[in-house]
Amino acid sequence: MRFTSVLLLGLAGLCASKPLLNRRWDDLKVRHSWVEVPRGWKLQGPAPADHKLAMRIGLKQDKLDELISALYTVSDPTHGNYGQHLSKEEVDALVAPHPDSMELVESWLAYHGVDPDDAVHRTSGGDWITVVVSVEKAERMLGTTYNVYEHEATSESIIRTMGYSLPSALHDHIQVVAPTTYFGTTRAMRATSFLEPGVKALESEADHSTELVTLGSMATISSSCSSTITPSCLRTLYNTSAYTPSATSTNKFGIVGYLEEYANHADLQTFFKKFRTDAVGADFITVEVNGGLDDQSDPGTEANLDIQYTEGLTYPTPNIYYSTGGSPPFIADSNTPTDTNEPYLDWLNYILNQTTIPQTFTTSYGDDEQSVPNDYAVSVCNLFAQLGARGSSVMFSSGDFGVGGGDCKTNDGTNTVRFQPIFPATCPYVTAVGGTYKINPEVAVSFSGGGFSNYFARPSYQSTAVSTFLTALGTKYQGLYNSTGRGFPDVAAQGQAFQVVIGGTTEPVSGTSASSPTFASVVALLNDYRISLGKAPLGFLNPLLYSTGVSGLNDITSGSNPGCSYAGFTARAGWDPVTGLGTPNFGKLQTIVESA
Ligand SMILES: *[C@@H]1O[C@H](CO)[C@@H](O)[C@H](O)[C@H]1NC(C)=O
Ligand SMILES: *[C@@H]1O[C@H](CO)[C@@H](O)[C@H](O)[C@H]1NC(C)=O
Ligand SMILES: *[C@@H]1O[C@H](CO)[C@@H](O)[C@H](O)[C@H]1NC(C)=O
């Protein structure tokens, strides 16, 4: 018996790439499918058979486990290798697919008449291959039907499918194929900022109340910072005012934008004149990624909020704004292939191909985790792990709907109400930032996104912090959230009524979109400090934050994040899924990172 099966396996191996066994490429097994059209999208009709798609194939990264363990080693302040980040070449070697995976995928492509040498793009690690194929061919390869779907809010049309299959023989070799079932696009993603209606804007720093409030030991802050945020409020509150960045030729700060959001140079100068006069004349640069544009006649609320506060808090640190395409949306009668229009992948593939990358990133976008296919989310999350291994700290806003927006029904066909965690905030390799408001003390702001992932298990760095919270929570909300999932956010910062100049006018803007750039700015200053001491940048922050970092954070112990028609979680002493471990105290964190 045993002998026979060994013999058969051997034969199968020998014939792996022989046409005789082509049957294997027709033995399709479902990889991912939806039971209903993702919310917010409407089926328009079949995709034209001859329309060209840029198909992105993510291969299994052979040494992913080694990459993750290297990530934790270089990010754990108690480890001898702390700060010994990997180079691009070292990461590329760990994410490369196994030669067998490459060979199998190439013979599958050849079977379908796709010459692998025609790949329009291959990542330097070899883990992502992009080929251009017609809709008709893609449908045969993936045993599916592509349709055109329209986004109800933006009228954007895209080509996607309700499900796709892969040959059984490839399931262990391919991580994800796109575009397939991820309906997120650069136009329809959710920015986590919103204008605050009915709140009066400040015309200048001088408009702050002269009434002072004493913070902690000695600092004083204007009482109006409790309702209106400017850079000076944050610099006082988070204790950065006394610090002047000096490693400005090395230390860089990246702000990632989507949704055709343009950061405006003139508005930044107006903002500086009003709220940070010593920085007047300082500017950021814009890098256009994958067809992203830089339309200075169309300032974006999100983009301006991000750049005005990152520059306002980290001046004179060089800030880079990444304007991520943005490919032309699908046009039915066009013969030019649509770009993949897979926002996270587009940006990540671009940035990971650079030899030198900024040490700090902030991104204020997110979507319900359940709207992102699991395979896709895992692939993207693993790409963030690469950024951490390379020595970059990656911040994401935690979302603006508390424990969940809307009716919070699951999309698995059962329509069960469950709290809705936000991706990428749930990725364990990013630092998720929730929101606060008020001062002395700060309080969790009600929209602060938080909860537990259904895709990613709880990482060990937060196991004590999160289980302490869950023990205190007891049986409350049982069944509404995943008690073994990664808890988020990790930290928090102010998120309400930030004064932002948009098209020359000052407007109050709120959201964890404001919190992420604020926390990330403190991190950029800490990176400046580390680099100025000749030390490595901080890289992936969470292992440090949940250990020695705790004493450099202000624990937020009141407020809650209602959503899904529930009262939400309540902030309490220690970590909580509303404000994480709390807001930063730069002075204290400086001491902590100095000895790390
Ligand atoms: C990666 O970088 C190299 C060198 O700068 C460049 O030649 C190549 O086109 C880049 N690839 C992508 C996919 O951006
Ligand atoms: C809960 O999270 C785990 C990962 O920790 C996951 O495997 C499981 O499927 C999740 N359960 C639900 C109901 O989503
Ligand atoms: C702010 O940081 C300084 C060190 O720069 C520290 O001495 C001081 O105690 C901190 N202030 C507060 C209020 O914690």
Image (tube, rainbow, N blue to C red):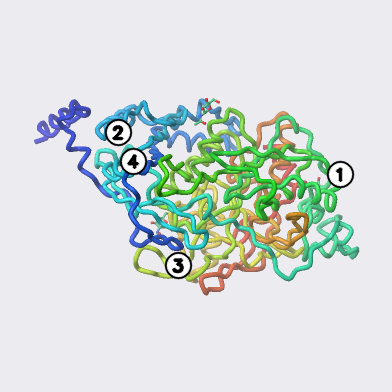
Q: Secondary structure at mark 4?
A: strand
* Residue 465 found in image quarter: bottom right
Q: The residue under label 2 is which amino acid type?
A: Leu
Does the beta carbon at disc 3 come under 8 Å from ligand 2? yes
Q: The residue under label 4 is which amino acid type?
A: Ser
Instruction: Residue at 84%, 53% (x, y): give it.
Output: 274
Give the mark count.
Answer: 4
The answer to whether residue 582 is above or below residue 328 is below
Instruction: Residue at 53%, 31% (x, y): give it.
Output: 353
* Residue 52 found in image quarter: top left
Numbered label attached to residue 418: 3
Q: Is residue 226 left or right of residue 463?
A: right
- Determine which residue is flagged by label 2: 109
Rounded to the nearest angstrom, the CA distance separating label 2 from label 3 is 41 Å
The answer to whether residue 47 is above or below residue 353 is below
Q: The residue under label 3 is which amino acid type?
A: Arg
Q: Is residue 372 left or right of residue 451?
A: left
- Determine which residue is flagged by label 1: 278
- Mark 1, other Cα within 10 Å: few <14 / some 14–19 / many ≥20: few
Q: Is residue 476 left or right of residue 314?
A: left
